[in-house]
Image (tube, coloured by chain):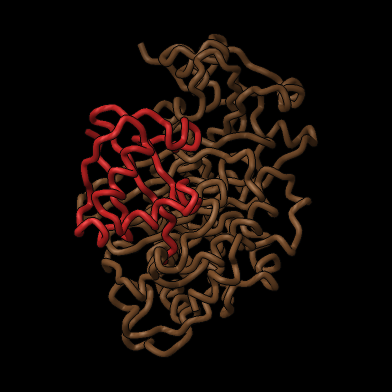
């Protein structure tokens, strides 16, 4: 079981939670598990081609999955998946 | 048995190694550490080029911060070569510096020989008082304070993030603060924009900020830009600044700023806030990743709410703005590890500060290329730019 950190803009889509748990052996499975459990997040995370939207950064613990194996990056029990869109408030 | 001053000096000089100014002159470029151990008020007559200053009375307590290698070649001098002889003996006998010498005749003989001196900028008595708590920190000291006084920092926005940043950078003695903001003070700003006041509602933010800054520190030269940053004015505004503090409230300007600063190789201390969350990173062009390496493109407007639409905890920009101010001071003075290649994430509700790594993107449309290849037309552009801006209104 991995922990997903939910950014402020997605919290309304997961019932206001700041963290949710999700099953899955890879980053992609964990995120699709999130999208299945909370369908409102799906369009925000994934494009029509099933790939992560380019404006969504995803980290496994503190590392960008883009420099790992992307959505195929293996996730272990106790890992944290951080979803991080850009913010522009000043 | 008592010893006279003259006898003591003779004995100390016989125990240490002395070096003639002509030899020191040859060594200036060779990596020897030259230490001026006179009192601060004596420096106005000039110092050896490249010499570092530590008064004799602080020599033992500060030397390790200046020379950590006990085997480094250290040359001490004073006015005439006496105090430096005592200093040299202390460093060798009591502190284990193996290669210490005292310059014969001090700065007086050096100048008599007609060798070059540099007249350092010195702090006025009022400045030494005002910045005394900085002068006491070895990492900053008079040298670091002078760097702050000589520094030019540009603040984008005198709003939530810009307010605390401007106040603390002014207090720290940053010599020139440029402020870009085309807005006027609104009552709804005052929940967090602490540089403004109730009496100044309705006046331009740059004027209000200038008034607060000068009330705090009249040393600071404020340069006001009451304009909205855009592609037509950005290069002329930001050129010549040492560090830029990004606290703007929209994506198009953040991308535009990134592209322009990469082109001019100006580091940016960037932060953003929303609700109870803050992000901060330092973008040092070609040394670390740029904003586009971190965020390849902005989210669509519905996923990029502004503080105006979604609200922000009033103290949050204070927290993030002061983290920015801290990074600015570090960059100017050249100390510590700036947040380059790291994105700091502050969660006010959880009271946690975490970080994720940020890498240079080898395919970055901007910083993967040399600065002179980035054209005016490309700056601030990203896919669906027009749609984004239309949606953002």
Name the side, left or right, on which B288 lies relative to A10.
Answer: right
Name the side, left or right, on which B110 lies relative to B201.
Answer: right
Q: Image height check: is B53 above or below B236?
A: above
Hey, which quadrant is residue A33 in on the image? top left
**Measured from the top left, where is residue B176 in percent x and y?**
56, 64
- The residue drawn where x is 39% and y is 43% is B136
**Measured from the top left, where is residue B50 in percent x and y?**
66, 35
Hey, which quadrant is residue B307 in on the image? bottom left
Instruction: Chain letter for red, please.
Output: A
- The residue drawn where x is 41% and y is 65% is B304
- The residue drawn where x is 79% and y is 32% is B113
Q: Image height check: is B354 above or below B170?
A: above
**Measured from the top left, where is residue A82 in percent x and y?**
34, 43
Which color is chain B depicted in? brown
**Measured from the top left, where is residue A26 in percent x and y?**
35, 32
Front position in the image: B2 or B311: B311
Q: Can you say which quadrant of the picture contains the N terminus of chain B? A: top left
Front position in the image: B60 or B110: B60
């Amino acid at each position: 079981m991995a922990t997903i950190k939910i950014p402020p803009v997605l919290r309304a889509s997961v019932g206001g939670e700041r963290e949710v748990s999700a099953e899955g052996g890879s980053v992609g499975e964990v995120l699709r598990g999130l999208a299945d459990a909370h369908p409102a997040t799906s369009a925000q995370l994934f494009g029509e081609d099933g790939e992560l939207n380019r404006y969504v950064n995803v980290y496994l613990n503190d590392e960008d999955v883009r420099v790992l194996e992307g959505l195929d990056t293996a996730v272990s029990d106790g890992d944290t998946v951080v979803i991080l869109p850009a913010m522009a408030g000043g | 048995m008592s010893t006279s001053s003259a006898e003591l000096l003779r004995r100390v000089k016989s125990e240490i190694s002395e070096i003639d100014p002509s030899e020191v002159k040859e060594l200036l470029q060779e990596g020897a550490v030259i230490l001026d151990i006179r009192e601060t008020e004596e420096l106005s007559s000039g110092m050896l080029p490249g010499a570092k200053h530590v008064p004799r009375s602080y020599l033992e307590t500060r030397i390790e911060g200046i020379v950590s290698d006990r085997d480094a070649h250290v040359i001490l001098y004073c006015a005439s070569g006496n105090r430096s002889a005592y200093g040299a003996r202390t460093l060798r006998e009591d502190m284990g510096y193996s290669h210490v010498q005292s310059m014969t005749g001090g700065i007086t003989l050096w100048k008599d020989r007609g060798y070059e001196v540099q007249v350092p900028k010195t702090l006025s008595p009022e400045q030494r008082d005002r910045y005394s708590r900085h002068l006491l920190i070895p990492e900053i000291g008079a040298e670091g304070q002078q760097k702050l006084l000589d520094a030019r920092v540009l603040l984008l926005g005198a709003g939530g993030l810009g307010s605390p940043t401007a106040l603390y950078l002014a207090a720290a003695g940053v010599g020139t603060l440029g402020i870009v903001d085309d807005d006027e003070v609104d009552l709804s700003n005052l929940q967090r924009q602490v540089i403004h006041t109730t009496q100044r509602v309705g006046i331009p933010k740059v004027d209000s900020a200038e008034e607060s800054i000068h009330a705090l520190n009249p040393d600071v030269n404020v340069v006001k830009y009451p304009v909205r940053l855009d592609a037509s004015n950005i290069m002329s505004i930001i050129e010549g600044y040492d560090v830029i503090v990004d606290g703007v409230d929209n994506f198009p300007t953040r991308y535009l700023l990134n592209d322009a600063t990469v082109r001019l190789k100006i580091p940016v201390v960037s932060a953003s806030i929303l609700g109870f969350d803050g992000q901060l990173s330092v973008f040092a062009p070609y040394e670390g990743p740029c904003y586009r390496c971190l965020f390849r493109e902005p989210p669509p407007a519905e996923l990029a709410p502004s503080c105006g639409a979604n609200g922000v905890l009033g103290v949050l920009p204070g927290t993030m703005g002061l983290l920015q101010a801290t990074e600015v001071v570090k960059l100017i003075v050249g100390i510590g590890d700036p947040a380059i290649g790291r994105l700091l994430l502050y969660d006010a509700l959880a009271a946690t500060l975490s970080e994720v790594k940020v890498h240079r993107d080898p395919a970055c449309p901007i910083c993967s290329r040399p600065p002179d290849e980035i054209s005016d037309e490309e700056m601030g552009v990203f896919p669906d730019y027009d749609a984004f801006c239309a949606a953002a209104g």
